Image: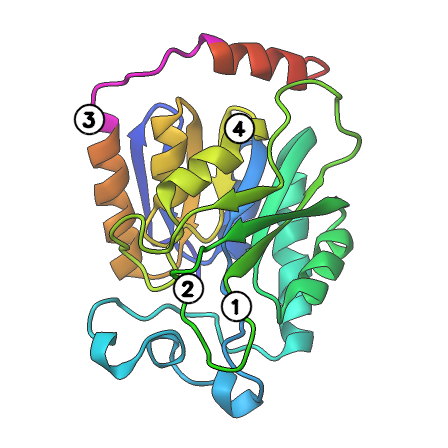
Amino acid sequence: MTTTRTEHLAEGVTLYLGDCLSILPTINQVDALLTDPPYSSGGMFRGDRMAPAVEKYQSSDYRQLYADFSGDNRDQRSFAYWSAIWLGLAREKTLQGGVCAVFTDWRQLPTTTDSIQAGGWIWRGLAVWDKTEAARPQKGRYRNQSEYLVWGSNGPLIEAGPCAPGVFRYSVASEAKQHIAGKPTMLLEDLLQICGKTILDPFMGSGSTGVAAVRSGRKFVGCEISPVHFDTACRRISDELKRPRLFTEKPLAAVQTSMFAAN
């Protein structure tokens, strides 16, 4: 699938409708990658994974609330192969020293750490999203209240800039979701603190990473394959661009100078 629509919402804020495998080779360089790709998870068996996302991740009472999303039904081998491809394309567009940060769940955590390295990134470690006790309980089991951020860099890191936490605690219900697998915008804002000025999200969904980027004074490049979610992202990021800015760009500029002085 090639790009079918491009929206330039502001200087440095561009959204693409289409498959990121086709789009990534065409974009300009970015400082960092922060994304939440489809995990191809949500089941122990192939038959489970092949179910629509609205069935895997929602009870029957809530299935009409959100549109479905694609790309969530690969088996583990094809998921790893596909991930290595797009991660490699994204690395080619990321400046030296830039950060990549990729969400995953417990099932695909080993595969994601392998794929980041296969894509040419240096794997640096994990951060944890603690979804709090609001995550769905399962009697007789430990609560699955964590998702993970596998992170790395495109080559050596410069030892400068802020020190970010390794655990981020936000409830899944901390804001109204626009997507089945949407992450809290405040969580994404926190994650961006070491990510430089221009952020890439090849799987932007409803645009939460873009909203977080704009809110914190950053530029944003986003890709989305679903027209429904693309339209939602355009609306949400446009609305955020219209809001009065309460931040000053001086702290971000200072971090940017220290992190990417070599570029």
Mark 1 or 3: the one toward you: 1
**Which label's residue is closer to the chain start, 4 or 3?**
4
Residue 84 lies in quadrant: bottom right
Q: Residue 135 carries which label?
A: 2
- Write the residue at 68% across / 50% down: 88
Residue 33, x across and y down, in percent: 57, 41
- Write the residue at 35% across / 15% down: 247
Q: Is residue 142 magenta?
A: no
Q: Do the residues labelled 2 and 4 touch (CB within 8 Å)?
A: no
Left or right placement of residue 156 versus residue 218 in this view? right
Which class describes the residues within 10 Å of circle 2: few (<14), some (14-19), or many (20+)?
some
Mark 2 or 3: the one toward you: 2
**Which label's residue is closer to the chain start, 1 or 4?**
1
Q: Is residue 114 above or below residue 187?
A: below
Q: Is the magenta stretch mostly helix, strand or loop?
A: loop
Residue 255, x across and y down, in percent: 58, 15
- Write the residue at 21% across / 68% down: 65
Q: Residue furthest front?
A: 140
Please say whether residue 170 is visible from this viewpoint: yes
Please say whether residue 260 is visible from this viewpoint: no
Q: Distance between the residues labelled 2 and 3?
A: 33 Å
Q: Distance between the residues labelled 2 and 4?
A: 26 Å
Q: Distance between the residues labelled 1 and 3?
A: 37 Å
Q: Which amino acid does label 4 sit on?
A: Gln
Q: Residue 144 carries which label?
A: 1
Mark 2 or 4: the one toward you: 2
Q: Mark 3 points at which residue?
A: 242
Q: Name the residue under label 4.
A: 193
Q: Are marks 1 and 4 in contact (CB under 8 Å)?
A: no
